[in-house]
Image (tube, rainbow, N blue to C red):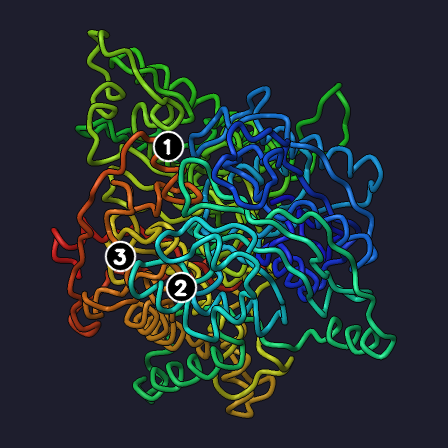
Amino acid sequence: FFCWAGNMKFVALLSGGKDSIYATLLALRHGHELVCCAHLAPRRRRRLSSSQDNDHHDDEDLEEESYMYQTAGSEAVRLQVEECMGLPFYVREIRGKSRNTSLVYEERGHDEVEDLFHLLQTVQKSHSEIEAVSSGAILSTYQRTRIEHVCQRLRLTSLSYLWRMSSQRALLDGILDDGGIEAVLVRVACPPGLLPQKHLNRNLRSLRDDGTLDDLHGRWGMHPAGEGGEYETLVVDCPALFRFGRLKLEEVVVVCDESDEGVGILRIRNCRVEKKMEKQESGNESEKGNGNKSITSHHYSTTALKGIVDHVAQSAKSQLPTSNSTMQSTIPKSIQNRVIRSMHLPNVRIMKGGLCHISALISPIACDNNYSNNNSNDKVDEAEAAVREFLTITQMLQTLLSRLTSSSTSSITPQDIIYVHLYLSEISHFAKINRHYQQYFGTHLPPSRSCVAVGHRALPGGRRVMMDCILQCDSGRYLRTDAIDENSTTDSFLQRAMANHHHPLRKVLHVQSLSTWAPVCIGPYSQANVLRSSLVFLAGMIGLIPETMRLIQSDGDDYAEGANDWELELHQSWRNAASVLDGLDDGGGVAGGKLEDCLGGLVYLSLGALEELFLSSVKGRGNGGGANDNDIPWEELWSRANSISRHAVSCNGGVVMGKVDGLSSSESNSNSNDGIDPTLYDEDGMLYGGYEDEETWREISGSLPATATVTATANDASESETPLLAVCLAELPMKAKAEVELICASRRAASCLRVV
């Protein structure tokens, strides 16, 4: 999001429940340093009627409802932090309301999200060293986007290690077993499964072990981890975090909702901290420092991934011809150094429906690297010259957009751009260009992007920057408009798009939190843009391990027999792409899909990959320094890249589609108890419309639309040849050796096109 040059000092945003506590534990396991904890406490309101209560607490206060924060169990959070964990604690009362309830949050006064902003601002004043914020968001886009919005304004990094981490039951098992967390239920809203008088104050572990949660999941589709709002918890002990004591609830009372007896909270009237013995304390320290404990996740270990790639790479190598005649395809230096001249006129193609492609955007004049300001004779570096070229390109693009606007009924802006290809002569220019890129495109619902370096003087006319982009007219306004004037007579793309309730004109997936799911957006771009629920434009994916944002590597430094680092990176790139597609799906099977839905893609390999393969082949032959240009293993590079890519497509990069959301896959029995009622997804395929639970969705939308989940039968991978183009370039971002860029069909579109 901003910079992850190392481990960060962070503040834990705690609700007191299992998710935020476990997320804090995972942040520590990934090497970050916990400085303090923060909590948003509910504002109390008086009960108006309690005539049916038998506990005689007629004057009992109730919490104000919140779409954003857990409020049950708030009374005990201070004890959790200050006495059990021994850390500084910051708290603020929730004063705002949920005024902006759309999934895309924009700053609005007196909204409860602003309370989070002011709370973290207070923390920053006392702890200027804070760099990040951890939270327990799992599947709620509503929560995640708001936390990310606040973090962006405060220049903090969002840590969300539970985001789409694993399947429902695996997540619960990870919290209880891996985290060692003991928690009790403090709120239930799942009648007739969970009842206030019966289940409040029950131990979560016992409900799992006696089969209660599995039974409710099978009968009613209840999320075992409570992610659908079925229940909320209070953690009474977490050995790795609660070093000094555990909570003991001395006096509690069950308070039922006046309008629904199936909904209730556990009011904690008195609790204390039971101190831990010195022996327990030292044992907890060793557990806390155990970074090798397994973390339940849907990601492979590096060792397992290396084994897969080893097998695929050796299979590809065995199919290569043994003759050296296939190794002769080196590029003459005369061609490499040739400067191509052109008229430098951009190509513009406008299609029906407002889709437009603008390509070959380059500066009309190559900026002289001897050019300088203030009549100085100082030589300006190449990066500054590249920046000037990029600024010229944005001016050209702005002129083109204004001309497109004058020829249509729509107002076309950079917000309508859904995808950008950015070609640089050197990747070292990227940092300076990216600042201006961000100013032009913004960080709110930006386009997806692929950025590569093609080599010095490789672009036409010796330019340093070239760009092309795809835009959809009015899609920017579509994302930012809740309603339109029904009396308007203007026949714009926006009017027509808003009237179409079946196919959203555009959707954007822009996750800005560090997690185990997929790489966070490093720059001002989105992981994916979806056009008309049909076409999915994925940003370029490199081989980053999501939770660390570092490139995957083999264990040894030497070139070992089998898979090289570039092959591991390539497989991880495909896996990241599959995770993004699965994240787009959000469980409904409409927007997202699988790698086999790919309509076409680019596999970028850097010269570093070629060099690595060359050195390993030379070492394998024992040829020492006698190698020449004819030994460059081009054919082996293409063959291995093709085999790894085809294998990744066939197994979907090791990602099981729909597993995180609790849906049975397309190959599973439709009667399986692993599935969730498809009517709980909106037309975009989002569980509860992207909100926290069904009740919130009903309240905000006014109704619960019924949708049909479309599934498709996958063909055998060998029968589907995904069109891929492999290209070897000078450099890739972050010194990566492999990158994957895809355009895919959504699941629904793929089933119609018979892609799968």
Q: Mark 1 points at which residue?
A: 699
Residue 197 placement (x, y as % from top left): 48, 54
Q: Pointer 3: residues within 10 angstroms few (<14), some, or many (20+)?
A: many
Q: Looking at the rendering, which quadrant does residue 146 occupy? A: top right
Question: Type of residue at label 1?
Answer: Glu
Residue 241: mark: none
Q: Which residue is drawn at 55% across and 79% down?
A: 615
Question: Type of residue at label 3?
Answer: Cys
Pick the residue in front: 174 or 350: 174
Query: Nearer the N terminus, badge 3 or badge 1?
Result: 3
Spatial CA distance of label 2 from label 1 is 39 Å
Q: Pointer 1: residues within 10 angstroms few (<14), some, or many (20+)?
A: few
Residue farthest right in this picture: 278
Residue 50 appears in the picture as rendered: yes
Q: What element carries label 3?
A: strand
**In the figure, is residue 455 to the left or right of 476?**
right
Q: Looking at the rendering, which quadrant does residue 119 occupy? A: top right
Q: Pointer 2: residues within 10 angstroms few (<14), some, or many (20+)?
A: many
Residue 574: mark: 2
Q: Is mark 2 on a helix, strand or loop?
A: helix
Spatial CA distance of label 2 from label 3 is 11 Å
**In the figure, is residue 282 to the left or right of 620?**
right
Query: Nearer the N terminus, badge 2 or badge 1?
Result: 2
Question: Type of residue at label 2?
Answer: Trp
Residue 598: mark: 3
Q: Which residue is drawn at 39% across and 52% down?
A: 190
